[in-house]
Structures are given as C-alpha cells and as structure tokens.
Image (tube, rainbow, N blue to C red):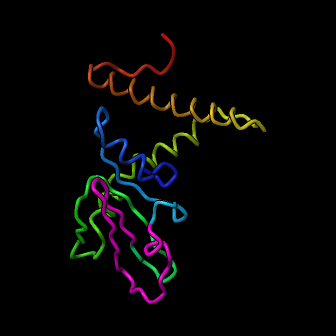
Amino acid sequence: MDNWFTSISLAEKLLTAPHKLTVVGTLRKNKKEIPTEMAEINKDRKLYTSMFAYNEKATLVSYKPKSTKHFFLLSTMHETGTINETTHKPEIIHTYNSTKGAVDTFVQMCQNMNCNSKTKRWPMCIIYNLLNMACINSSVIYNHNVITHGEKLVAGNK
C-alpha cells in the first residue's frame, strides 16, 4: 500500500476474517499511531539504522537513509525485524520495493485514462476517482479472463 491508504487500524482489519490479507505499506509521518520516540528525527541517530515497534498483529519500522529523512513502513506480514546483511535495510523495505510496482502502475494508469472533470464539489471528485479505478479494475479482469481462456483481445465493440 501507498502511504495514502496505510494505517494500523486498516491493516489489522484486513488481517482478520473474511479478508485475511497481509499489508506492507508506507506510513505518513504525521500519523497519530506512530510512537513519539520513532516520529521525531533524531540527529544523533546513525545513518542506515532501523527502529522497530511491534504489537500482536503488526510490525512498524523507522529507517533512516539520510541525515534529514526517515521512512515508516508497516507490515502485518513480518513478525520480526530482520535486516538484510548486504544492504543493511530491513526486510520489510525489500518486500515493499519488490511489490510496489503494481501500485505505481495503477496510479500511472489512472493518470493516463482519466474521466475527471473540473469541479468545485468534492463528492464529484471522489466519484470521478472511483470511476477511474473501476475502469482500470474492469480492464484488468477482462484481460485476465481473455488470456486464461485463450481468446484474442477485442479492441472495440463487437
């Protein structure tokens, strides 16, 4: 997940039945769910260090790649704070980087195939974005069904 959607409460809800989905995503720095010890940029903290916080269902990591930046990632998939020995990054970051391509592609497709119209009414903005997501999701489902059934893709109406 991107930081727009990620929260600890949502991750815990998705982990329970009937969904049973794990989450790996970035968190915004201003989330109230982040402990104050992790949220503050500590200038004395060394570069490439990680801080972990755990609860029963999730793992939160703060990683400092630069002297003025640190990133927060949340995972319900990882139970321990394992750090890769070659890159010195937490495994949560490696998992996120290897799977975030789909989110980036989805955002790019939403920008390319856009039904938005200029409006001052915020509910319309939400409806336009839902229509964008529905169009892309239906296209993905259509392409998957056509490929699994061995048919040719149709470029227009029948």
Check the image and report above or below for 11 versus 94. above
Magenta-span inclusion, residue 57: yes
Residue shown at 47% from the left, 83% from the top = 42
Between 138 and 148, the one nearer to me in the picture: 138
Magenta-span inclusion, residue 71: no
Q: Which residue is farthest top?
A: 158
Query: Which of the 4 image quadrants contains residue 18?
Result: top left
Residue shown at 25% from the left, 68% from the top = 81
Query: Which of the 4 image quadrants contains residue 38?
Result: bottom left
Between 110 and 146, the one nearer to me in the picture: 110
Residue 110: x, y in percent?
A: 55, 40
- Left or right? Give the position of 49 relative to 106: left
Residue shown at 30% from the left, 72% from the top = 89
Residue 12: x, y in percent?
A: 35, 47
Check the image and report above or below for 71 versus 96. below
Residue shown at 34% from the left, 75% from the top = 50
- Left or right? Give the position of 19 relative to 108: left
Between 157 and 118, the one nearer to me in the picture: 118
- Left or right? Give the position of 23 relative to 68: left
Q: Which residue is farthest right?
A: 120
Magenta-drawn segment? 35-62
- Left or right? Give the position of 112 relative to 119: left
Residue 118: x, y in percent?
A: 75, 37
